[in-house]
Amino acid sequence: MVTYIHFKDPNAREMTDLIEGLEKCPGTCFFIDIIHSTRLKYYTPVTEWVRKINNTFNFISFLNDFPENIVKGIGDEIMLYIPDEDLKIKSSYNTFFELLEEIHATIFNIKHFPDNNLFLNCRVAIHHCTDVYNISFFEGVNDYYGSDIDITARLMGHSRENEIILSENFYQKVLGDLQTMGLPPDTGCLESISRKITTRFKGVPMDTEYRMIEVR
């Protein structure tokens, strides 16, 4: 349940009490971005680019299974946040491995669809978060804030067309699922996963580890 934070008094004791009582909401954050949509708006009529964006979002069936987890859209990029507790009770995809396989399959199918005039390619960043709070500063809006949301956005900045970037945190969650299922660590799309990459993002005081999967 989202906690609405809105106090006109900047020093309100009630605000401090509310913030001190917040609990973290661990879960998986996704950023999904449609590629080349900005350029398309300049060189094609509205009937063309709106149709393609509509088709692309509708083709990502993964979104239809988590409609309540779509947090926000910025231009042609959307953010999803799936709390761990929500994932456990899903009837369709309820493991981290299944989430990864589904988004990989979707990007693959879009890339290789016979009619290349229907869809636009995508790029994705995924991170399993622990430092996140289900809070909003706007009434009636569900949202999530925390340093791990920022990490996911930074990862997105390193992703490319037809590529999935996943944090080492999320990757370890996926490996945990495979171990539970008795499957090898190179199952499915993990067969083509990159080595671990370490970088220091601007504004983040520690290194971030991540891996990449190029959807071929």
Image (cartoon, grey):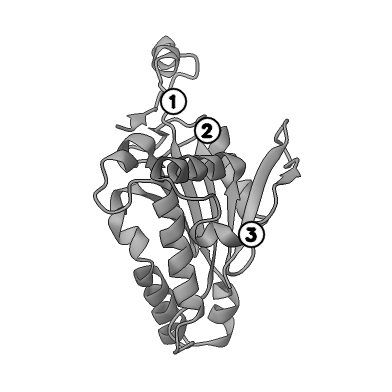
Residue 101 picture quarter: bottom left
Helix, strand or loop at label 3? It is loop
Mark whose residue sits in front, 1 or 2:
1
Q: Viewed as shown, does residue 133 lie left or right of 191?
A: left
**Residue 52 vertical position relative to residue 155 in the rendered view, above or below:** below
Looking at the rendered image, the quarter that the N terminus falls into is top left
**Residue 192 vertical position relative to residue 91 in the rendered view, above or below:** below
What's the residue type where badge 1 is placed?
Lys
- Please report the residue visible at 44 percent of the width from the left and 50 percent of the height from the top: 97
What's the residue type where badge 2 is placed?
Gly
**Residue 6 vertical position relative to residue 70 in the rendered view, above or below:** above
Which circle's residue, 2 or 3, is located before the other in the chain?
2
- Please report the residue visible at 35 percent of the width from the left and 30 percent of the height from the top: 4
Q: At which x and y percent is residue 100?
A: 46, 55
Which circle's residue, 1 or 2, is located before the other in the chain?
1
Helix, strand or loop at label 2? It is loop
Q: Which mark is residue 24?
A: 1
Spatial CA span between label 2 and label 3: 21 Å
Q: Mark 2 highlights which residue?
A: 146
Mark whose residue sits in front, 2 or 3:
3
Labels 1 & 2 near each other (Cβ < 8 A): yes
